[in-house]
């Protein structure tokens, strides 16, 4: 999939504020600071379509973006940030769960994991819950530029074992080098049934 256009649609705190469910939708989830904003910005070739904010503790919203007038990307609030006040943390779960369990156009969730970390309880819970709801997960291991090739391959295998999924299901990604960008976009296009545009013949 080639991203030709990307624009912010709206933010929503609850269902009544979601945009009309017309286009296929892909949501992005991950713990705070995992690199979710950087991943989305890389996919859409923009520096700051999604703000890479470093102020946890604010009430967070679900943000909707139109991509190519063909698919909607949904930036879910980051989870698992210990410094977030309990009151705010408590409203995240329901907000994300309501979205994921009721959104009729949702085609899959890109679950972003740091390649250097063993998946925590939040990640395992999220993946198990998506599975129980029949929502396909697209797991992506980000920040691969932080590890050597050998170490990255080892971590990929370890995380796959940990999650009980085949290793080649885990896409290796880096916002710094853009490694894995096309693999993520292709997985998304595949999930949404968007066929790749035919290669144009070079002009004679
Ligand atoms: N080296 C490296 N740093 C990254 C990568 N992705 C994100 N970061 C850094 O990780 C921090 C958190 O990134 P951000 O996208 O804001 O994370 P978010 O909280 O999940 O949205 C920032 O300092 C980014 O520059 C990556 O692929 N490689
Ligand atoms: Mg972010």
Image: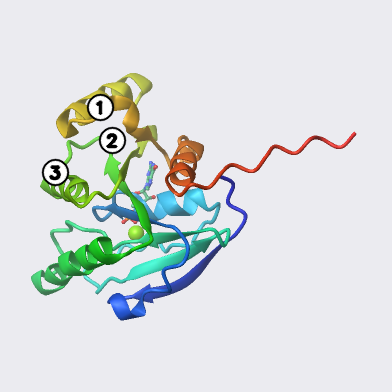
In this view, the residue farthest toward the bottom is 16
Mark sitting earlier along the chain (1/3): 3
Q: CA distance from mark 2 to mark 3?
A: 12 Å
When asked about the image quadrant of residue 155, the answer is top left
Give the x, y percent position of residue 198. Answer: 68, 39
Contact between marks 1 and 3 (CB within 8 A): the answer is no
Contact between marks 2 and 1 (CB within 8 A): the answer is yes
- The residue positioned 81% from the left and 35% from the top of the image is 202
Residue 203 sits above or below residue 14 on the image: above
The residue pinned by badge 3 equals: 120
- Taking depth in this image into account, of 6 and 78 the one nearest to the observer is 6
Q: In this rendering, does residue 56 appear at all? A: no
Residue 177 sits above or below residue 63 on the image: above
- Taking depth in this image into account, of 85 and 17 the one nearest to the observer is 17
- The residue positioned 47% from the left and 64% from the top of the image is 65
SS class, disc 3: loop
The residue pinned by badge 2 equals: 115
Give the x, y percent position of residue 152. Answer: 32, 26
The residue pinned by badge 1 equals: 155
Q: In this rendering, does residue 81 appear at all? A: yes
- Taking depth in this image into account, of 180 and 26 the one nearest to the observer is 26
């Amino acid at each position: 999939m080639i991203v030709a256009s990307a624009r912010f649609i709206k933010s929503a705190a609850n269902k009544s504020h979601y945009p009309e469910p017309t286009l296929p939708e892909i949501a992005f989830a991950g713990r705070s600071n995992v690199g979710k904003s950087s991943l989305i910005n890389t996919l859409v070739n923009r520096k700051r379509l999604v703000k890479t904010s470093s102020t946890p503790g604010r009430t967070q919203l679900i943000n909707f973006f139109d991509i190519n007038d063909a698919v909607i990307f949904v930036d879910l609030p980051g989870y698992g940030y210990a410094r977030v006040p309990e009151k705010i943390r408590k409203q995240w779960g329901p907000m994300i769960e309501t979205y994921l369990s009721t959104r009729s156009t949702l085609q899959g969730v890109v679950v972003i994991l740091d390649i250097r970390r063993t998946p925590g309880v939040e990640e395992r819970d999220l993946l198990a819950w998506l599975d129980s709801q029949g929502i396909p997960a697209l797991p992506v291991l980000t920040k691969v530029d932080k590890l050597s090739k050998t170490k990255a391959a080892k971590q990929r295998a370890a995380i796959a074992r940990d999650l009980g999924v085949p290793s080649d299901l885990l896409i290796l990604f880096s916002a710094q080098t853009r490694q894995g960008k096309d693999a993520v976009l292709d997985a998304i296009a595949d999930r949404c049934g968007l066929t790749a545009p035919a290669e144009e013949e070079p002009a004679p």
